Image (cartoon, rainbow, N blue to C red):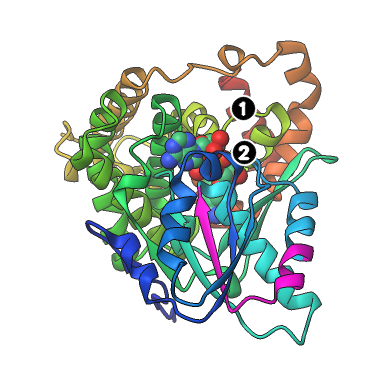
């Protein structure tokens, strides 16, 4: 038995930020990063809160891959304000940090009443505006922890395309591939079902069609909107059925080598698909469940899919082609990782990835050695 519910209200379309104008006489705590504050995007929020007897306070110290210390500082700031509403505006880092801030603040101050959480993504990538995940980094241990709890699910997500217009091409590429990875991992997840498939299929279609356009011309608002929607759709899919070892490895490698999350996923995606498809363990006309799922996706996308093998190969070709169009680096060395350093940490990476929360829904159960072989392919 599985219960499916969608708690987050999603606001889309032109001027969707105007839904903030409904807020009246509330105490609002806003979490964001310095760029969002300086770029004028934060003003899009505060202007809509003004003149309605709202009191607001801004915590803008979020850095990419938010560390535990920043979350702790945010908890302290929130406890002083005692807000009724928390608005997180920014990329996955700002929204994830805000989720953790809320979670810990409620845990440590029982007198604090529940706080309404509004997420406003300014990148199209993590889908965190509709998920009960938050990824926090422990810099001392150089590891990222995915927190998973119902309380982390935002109450409202505002998808206003004007906020993503300014995302630079490299971040558009990284975050767009993150969306693709979410959708593909959800599609082959052990727990995938017809409902998650519907969201994942649509997200993959939108990414292949519109991500190259959004990358080439950030002002192409149609492409921006489609990629923004794809991000949330993929979030809805994986929130229901989980992710897989692409993310498990990316969490550890990304923290270890300071590589942006989506770029790390992009490096791993072909190797993880080959591992999960597992053609070597099956004889002529028998295939793993994951191979069949990848093949189905290729067929839906209209890629050559005469048989399962051909279909998986065409999906891989399309992913490689997309990565090329987005000028993604081809391996860890191209991201500045030193081979000697890699050799000293690869076992630690593999062991930590095996224990990551995302491993349990991967379609194939890996061993430490399996993960080590995957990471060896991307150096
Ligand atoms: N919670 C989840 O379900 C989930 C899923 C995947 C990834 N993550 C986590 O999310 C984080 C990554 O988030 P991200 O990829 O959105 O990147 P990010 O939030 O770290 O932002 C990347 C950079 O882009 C800038 N930026 C944000 N919006 C911009 C805009 N509109 N214009 C120009 N620049 C802009 C930011 O200031 C930052 O410098 C990682 O910590 C990752 O582990 C979480
Ligand atoms: Fe991700």
Q: Residue at x 46, y 43 (%)?
A: 40
Q: Is residue 184 above or below residue 186?
A: above
Q: Is residue 38 visible?
A: yes
Q: Residue at x 46, y 30 (%)?
A: 266
Q: In the rendering, at what x and y percent does residue 72 appear? A: 79, 58
Q: Quadrant of the C terminus?
A: top right
The quadrant of the picture occupied by the N terminus is bottom left
- Which is nearer the eye, 7 or 372? 7
- Which residues lie in the magenta part? 76-90
Whether residue 75 is situated above or below residue 109 in the rendered picture: above
Q: Are marks 1 and 2 in contact (CB under 8 Å)?
A: yes
Q: Quadrant of residue 349?
A: top right
The tag earlier along the polypeptide, 1 or 2, is: 2
Query: Residue 369 versus residue 183: which sits nearer the camera?
Result: 183
| Mark 2: few/some/many CA within 10 Å (<14, 14-19, 20+) | many
Q: Is residue 87 magenta?
A: yes
Q: Is residue 1 left or right of residue 260?
A: left
Q: Residues within 10 Å of mark 1 (few under 14, many from 20)?
A: many
> Disc 1 and disc 2: Cα gap in Å?
8 Å
Q: Is residue 210 left or right of residue 112?
A: left
Compared across the picture, whether 20 is left or right of 224 comes to: right
Q: Is residue 297 visible?
A: no
Q: Secondary structure at mark 2?
A: helix
- Judged from the image, the secondary structure of the residue bearing numbered disc 1 is helix
Kindly identify which numbered label has been placed on residue 249. 2
Q: Which is more toward the observer, 48 or 349?
A: 48
- For label 1, the residue is 375
């Amino acid at each position: 038995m599985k219960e499916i519910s969608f708690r987050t209200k999603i606001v889309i379309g032109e001027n969707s930020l105007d839904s903030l104008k409904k807020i009246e006489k509330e105490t609002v705590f806003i979490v964001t990063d310095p760029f969002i504050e300086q770029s004028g995007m934060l003003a899009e929020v505060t202007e809509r809160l003004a003149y309605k007897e709202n009191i607001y306070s801004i915590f803008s110290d979020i850095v990419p891959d938010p560390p535990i210390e920043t979350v702790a500082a945010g908890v302290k700031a929130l406890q002083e304000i005692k807000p009724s509403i928390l608005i997180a505006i920014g990329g996955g880092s700002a929204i994830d940090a805000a989720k953790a801030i809320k979670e810990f603040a409620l845990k440590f101050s029982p007198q604090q009443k529940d706080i309404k959480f509004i997420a406003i993504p300014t990148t199209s990538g993590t889908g965190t505006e509709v998920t009960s995940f938050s990824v926090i980094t422990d810099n001392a241990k150089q590891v990222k922890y995915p927190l998973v709890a119902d309380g982390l699910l935002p109450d409202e997500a505002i998808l206003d395309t004007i906020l993503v217009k300014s995302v630079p091409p490299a971040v558009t590429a990284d975050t767009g591939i993150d969306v693709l990875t979410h959708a593909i991992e959800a599609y082959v997840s052990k727990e995938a079902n017809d409902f998650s498939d519907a969201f994942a299929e649509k997200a993959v279609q939108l990414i292949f069609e519109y991500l190259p356009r959004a990358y080439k011309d950030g002002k192409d608002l149609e492409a921006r909107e489609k990629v923004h929607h794809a991000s949330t759709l993929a979030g809805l899919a994986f929130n229901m059925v989980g992710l897989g070892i692409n993310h498990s490895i990316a969490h550890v490698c990304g923290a270890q080598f300071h590589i942006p999350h989506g770029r790390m996923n992009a490096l791993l995606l072909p190797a993880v698909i080959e591992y999960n498809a597992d053609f070597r363990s099956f004889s002529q006309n028998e295939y793993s469940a994951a191979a069949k799922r990848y093949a189905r996706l290729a067929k839906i996308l209209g890629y050559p899919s005469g048989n399962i093998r051909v279909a998986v190969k065409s999906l891989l070709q399309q992913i490689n082609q997309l990565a090329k169009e987005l000028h993604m680096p081809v391996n860890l060395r191209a991201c500045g990782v030193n081979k000697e350093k890699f050799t000293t940490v690869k076992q630690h990476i593999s062991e930590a990835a095996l224990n990551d929360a995302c491993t349990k829904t991967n379609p194939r159960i890996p061993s430490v050695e399996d993960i080590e072989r995957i990471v060896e392919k991307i150096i």
